[in-house]
Image (tube, grey):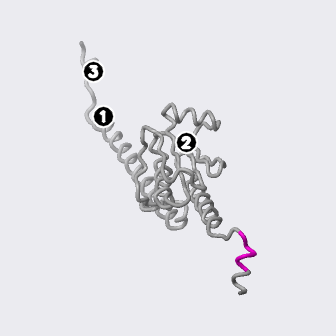
Amino acid sequence: MDSQQVQAATPKPGTGSRALRQVLVALVCLVATVAAAYLLYSETQTWRRSRYPYIYAVAPKSAKPKYAVSGAAKSETERLGKPGAPLTVQASLPSSPCVDIIRAMLRDAAQKHGDKSLYVEIYNSATPEGRAFEEQKKVHCATVFVRGTAMEVRHGRGGDQVRAAIDRAVAEAQGKKTQPSNPTSATAKEGA
């Protein structure tokens, strides 16, 4: 090997550190860019939340209605209230926890109005009796029947409508009980 070949094979001093310096500069620039992008993003999100709070509003955890009874499913059909009551509410609910709020609301209504004018039947759609009820009524999901009117309550939605329908029906049933059967005799007594 002659001296020219030896010089060509030996690295020149400072070339390795120069490449390393270039990589480090690129890496520092990349980290600085990512940090700046994150700061801009977080500032934008803060501005959005202050400018449009209704978009980012989260319902408080206490927004769920509190019922006196729990909503856990039972393995058999529940019959609550007074059989033969003027108002019968029937429900076909799965044993899934997504409709526990509806089940609790029905139990609460039966506890509140059951001694007077309400009879509630809650069918568990996982049982043979529940499947037969669903087949008879031709429903496939969580449904509540108030005076024969079907109201779908999938995933616990529609509970307010069911509650309002039950309250109206109970008020009508109690109103029919308290009204006199012969209104002419009531006015005659008032005039006397």
Q: Nearer the viewer, mark 1 or mark 2?
A: 2
Residue at the spot of label 2 = 92
Range covered by the magenta-colored residues: 182-187
Horizontal side, residue 97 vs residue 142: left or right: left
Residue 9: image tag: 3
Q: Of the residues under marks 3 and 1, which one precedes in the sequence?
A: 3
- Which residue occupies the extreme top position in the image? 1
Q: Main secondary structure of the magenta part?
A: helix
Question: Which element is circle 1 on?
Answer: helix
Residue closer to the observer: 65 or 114: 114
Give the residue type that dot 1 points to: Thr
Which tag, 2 or 3, sits closer to the chain's start?
A: 3
In what element is the residue under mark 2? strand
The structure residue drawn at horizontal position 24% and vertical position 12%, both measured from the top left corner, is 1
| Residue visible at 62% across and 58% down in the picture | 165
Residue that label 1 marks: 15
Query: Which one is nearer the viewer's eye here, 100 or 131?
Result: 131
Q: Amino acid at mark 3?
A: Ala
Tell me where residue 141 sits by quadrant.
top right
In the rendered image, residue 161, in percent from the top left (x then y), is placed at: 60, 57
